């Protein structure tokens, strides 16, 4: 959530920044008007309270001296009635202001490239030579099904489209990838978290999924509970509504969880295979930092995701998202895109975002700056990595002519020494 004081003091800059996103910034005028009425109502309430206090003291003095105070008492009653009316209006204005602020996205950083969509994302670097094959390349679906280890048909019977049953060594490979990634982050000093996979609406509001993206979520019928779309949601909220010491920062968490997304609006996209599923697994990094630490943390988190791909020997490119492609709560985002030979293109496998104090304001995550002043923390999140998409990349980049899959060296210990997956 944006700071209303920032909007008040720099409305033109805020509007200009939001326009870069393609966001309808006319709401800023509405916000300012509601906030003006809110402040006027506060002043009326305060001045009325002051007048009531003066009259109340006068009533006390008159009664003490045996004089008639009925006129003053009547005036106090009238003032209290009028103040109650103003207070009710003020409460409604507070709700109205909060609702308007909650749908405004974060401001983007000055170095975010401008553009309407992903075509304007900026390539930072490419790493790794693209593999060459002397046989016809298969996609991960054909490879997994020929091995008898990816079963989309049975998953469709069990649930529906965009689900899968992993079997045998591919189930083990998915688990091996996740275990390797968790261990990688533990060596970097992260604290491992296993959060609830079901959260309430307040938790989703804190990280910005609600109210704007409710249609993307799976809600449990009859309850104010939702399946998590990413571990970012519960893990960032570990510090919700807390005030803690600056010495605790930075906090660095890693979590391996299933993720559940309705994929609203994505019908017809990536319907084949594991790229866009309703249920998938992800290893997630979350950092909570001071303002001074957040940029360094963003670079370090991005580098960690890069190092994992390099250890897996998977070709990738690093992109900075443009103003029209960046997420609602992010101020600055890097995407890592891994090479998929069967698609002959790079596809997203990690997104690492610095949200600055945007989420912290919503979730009331604060620390004592300099040991004294309560200050909103900065929050960051990133995939380290998406496990299913990593498995896709391993299958396609490490495929062999006979349909078997070579196991990346860094994963072989996690596979019990198995070097090749074959029929």
Image (cartoon, helix red, strand yellow):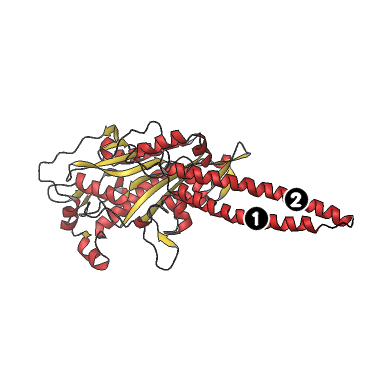
Dot 2: what SS? helix
Q: Which residue lies furthest to the right in this view?
A: 65
Q: Give residue 53's mark.
A: 2
Q: In this view, does 134 lie to the left or right of 359?
A: left
- Image height of 73 relative to 305, above or below: below
Labels 1, 2: front one: 1
Rendered-image quadrant of the C terminus: bottom left
- Residue found at x 42% / y 38%: 107
Horizontally, residue 383 falls left or right of residue 66, namely left
- Residue 403 % position (x, y): 14, 51
Q: In the rendered image, is residue 21 in sight?
A: yes
Count of marks placed on residues: 2
Q: How far from the left and from the top, in percent, is residue 257?
A: 38, 55
Marks 1 and 2, how far apart in space?
Answer: 15 Å
Q: Quadrant of residue 351?
A: top left
Local crowd size for mark 1, using a 10 Å CA cut-off: few (<14), some (14–19), many (≥20)? some
Q: Mark 1 points at which residue?
A: 82
Nearest to N terminus: mark 1 or mark 2? 2
Instruction: Please identify the residue farthest to the left as the structure is shown.
Output: 135
Q: Measured along the vertical axis of the image, is residue 301 above or below residue 176?
A: above
Q: Residue at x 39, y 52 (%)?
A: 212
* Residue 180's disc number: none
Residue 39 versus residue 158 in the image, above or below:
above
Asked if marks 1 and 2 touch (Cβ < 8 Å), the reply is no
Image location of residue 61, percent across then percent down = 85, 52
Side of 45 where 298 appears, left or right: left
């Amino acid at each position: 959530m944006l700071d209303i004081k920032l909007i008040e003091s720099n409305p033109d800059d805020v509007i200009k920044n939001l326009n870069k996103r393609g966001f309808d910034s006319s709401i800023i005028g509405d916000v300012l008007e509601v906030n003006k009425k809110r402040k006027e109502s506060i002043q009326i309430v305060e001045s009325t309270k002051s007048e009531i206090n003066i009259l109340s003291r006068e009533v006390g003095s008159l009664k003490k001296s045996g004089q008639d105070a009925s006129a003053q008492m009547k005036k106090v009653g009238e003032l209290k009635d009028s103040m109650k009316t103003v207070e009710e209006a003020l409460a409604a204005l507070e709700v109205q202001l909060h609702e308007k602020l909650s749908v405004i996205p974060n401001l983007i950083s000055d170095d975010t490239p401008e553009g309407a969509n992903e075509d304007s994302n900026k390539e930072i670097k490419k790493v790794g030579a693209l593999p060459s094959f002397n046989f016809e390349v298969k996609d991960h679906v054909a490879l997994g099904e020929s091995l008898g280890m990816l079963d989309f048909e049975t998953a469709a019977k069990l649930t529906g489209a965009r689900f899968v049953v992993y079997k045998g060594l591919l189930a083990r490979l998915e688990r091996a990838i996740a275990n390797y990634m968790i261990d990688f982050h533990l060596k970097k000093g992260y604290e491992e978290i296993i959060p609830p996979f079901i959260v309430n609406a307040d938790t989703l509001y804190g990280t910005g999924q609600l109210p704007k993206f409710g249609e993307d979520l799976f809600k449990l019928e009859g309850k104010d509970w939702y399946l998590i779309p990413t571990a970012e949601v519960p893990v960032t909220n570990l510090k919700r509504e807390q005030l803690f010491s600056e010495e605790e920062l930075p906090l660095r968490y890693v979590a391996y969880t299933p993720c559940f997304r309705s994929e609203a609006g994505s019908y017809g996209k990536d319907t084949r295979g594991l790229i866009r599923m309703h249920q998938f697994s992800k290893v997630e990094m979350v950092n909570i930092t001071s303002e001074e630490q957040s940029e360094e943390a963003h670079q370090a988190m991005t580098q960690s995701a890069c190092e994992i791909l390099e250890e897996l020997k998977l070709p990738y490119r690093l992109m900075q998202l443009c103003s029209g492609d960046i997420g609602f709560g992010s101020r600055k985002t890097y995407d890592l895109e891994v090479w998929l030979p069967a698609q002959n293109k790079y596809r997203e496998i990690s997104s690492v975002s610095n949200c600055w104090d945007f989420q912290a304001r919503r979730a009331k995550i604060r620390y004592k700056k300099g040991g004294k002043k309560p200050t909103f923390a900065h929050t960051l999140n990133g995939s380290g990595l998406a496990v299913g998409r990593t498995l896709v990349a391993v299958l396609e980049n490490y495929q062999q002519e006979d349909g078997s899959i070579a196991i990346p060296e860094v994963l072989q210990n996690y596979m019990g020494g198995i070097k090749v997956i074959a029929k």
